Image (tube, rainbow, N blue to C red):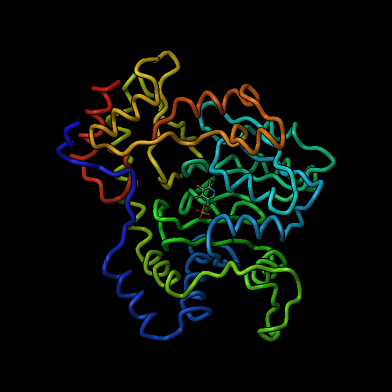
Amino acid sequence: MTKPQREIGLSSPDITQAEIDAVTEVLRSGRLSLGPAVKAFEQAVAQYCGTRHAIAVSSGTCGLHLLMRSIGVGPGDEVVTTPFSFIASANCVLFDGGRPVFVDIDADTWNIDVDQAASAVTSRTKAILPVHVFGLMCPMDELRAIADRHELRLIEDSCEALGSTYRGQRAGAAADAGVFGFYPNKQITTGEGGMITTDDDEIARLCRSLRNQGRDSGMGWLSHERLGYNYRLSDVSCAIGVAQMRRIDEILSRRSRVAGWYVERLRDEPRVVLQRLPDDCGMSWFVFVVKLADDYDEPTRNDLIHRLRDAGIGSNNYFAPIHLQEFYREQFGYKPGDFPVCEAVAARTVALPFHGKLTESEVDHVCDTLKRLL
Ligand SMILES: *Cc1c(COP(=O)(O)O)cnc(C)c1O
């Protein structure tokens, strides 16, 4: 096969000299862990989201795990969540023996279906864990009403939504606690990393202790109050995070401009459907995903992805339903057909190249190629 003339990757981190200088400064300082960069990064995210606390951790997955621990999810407890997500949002419930109870998604926003979430609550339910899919925030007021009615915790998986809003409230500040992830394809990156955000002093205190081997503040290095982990994020990573947070408005506005170019070119294309973005939500774009129209059938979604890649355009399916992953099927007996809306959306979605450095002519090229291949 001949190599395409140009290659456009699926994602790319937005790293400048500022991040490089910040890392160099930490390396020169000699304080590589538990130093000032951690506090500075936590303060920057807390201030940006409008929460009392932010706790840096080594990944979004670790943050989700600590939140499940800090609200006491254990054997016999259920957490209502969505199967249309990255696997970590359900795995975090399993880590300490809880059970993720899936409900289907809304066919247009691709976020958790609120009515089905309400119906899934049982006497064993401990929390609702909505995921802001691709950056679009869930209807948090309605979810809060369900949580309050049954005295449940409400935890947002905000990993894809740094900077997104719902009725004026930022992701990370719209529930009892939230989590961000900083893998290189996210809005901002620290290489690997995550951040818990919360207004709840008790959740914050527990998460700080649990990420640091169960130590409590004030006590000695070898004094461990509870079973904890090493989920700390290094000062090197946090320094990248501080530099990224200083540039957050610029980073997000570039991504938003690129998304705008895509929307312009694809909103009237009858063979694809875009995620519906309700008026009360402000979008911080994580990825650009299109869904093949329901009456569209050739080439198949997977063929289309391969043909895009052959043409030098990064492309992927996004997401694969969690309940159909092998170990979920084995452990819980899930099967195809259990969550038909999730499965139908998952079978038809295609992620296109998306990051803030894409040019308008690159977006043109992706959209022209997509339309030619459809
Ligand atoms: C990225 C992501 C996470 C966390 O990922 P890490 O790689 O552990 O930082 C969790 N949930 C969702 C929905 C994500 O997209």
Q: Residue 246: which quarter of the image? A: bottom left
Residue 306 in percent (x, y) is at 33, 29
Q: Residue 300: which quarter of the image? A: top left
Residue at 54% over, 50% down:
158
Residue at 63% over, 73% down:
212
Between 221 and 360, the one nearer to me in the picture: 221
Residue 47 in percent (x, y) is at 51, 66
Q: Using residue 350 as the reference point, say whether residue 72 is left or right of it.
A: right
Q: Using residue 1 as the reference point, say whether residue 91 is left or right of it.
A: right
Q: How many marks?
A: 0
Q: Using residue 251 as the reference point, say whether residue 233 is left or right of it.
A: right
Check the image and name the residue furthest to the left. 5
Q: Using residue 304 as the reference point, say whether residue 162 is left or right of it.
A: right
- From this view, report whether residue 298 is shown above or below residue 28: above
Placement of the C terminus among the 4 image quadrants: top left
Residue 132 in percent (x, y) is at 54, 43
Check the image and name the residue furthest to the right. 123
- From this view, report whether residue 369 is shown above or below residue 240: above
Between 54 and 80, the one nearer to me in the picture: 80
Q: Residue 184: which quarter of the image? A: bottom left
Residue 271 in percent (x, y) is at 35, 19
Placement of the N terminus among the 4 image quadrants: top left
Residue at 26% over, 32% down:
310
- From this view, report whether residue 84 is shown above or below residue 335: below
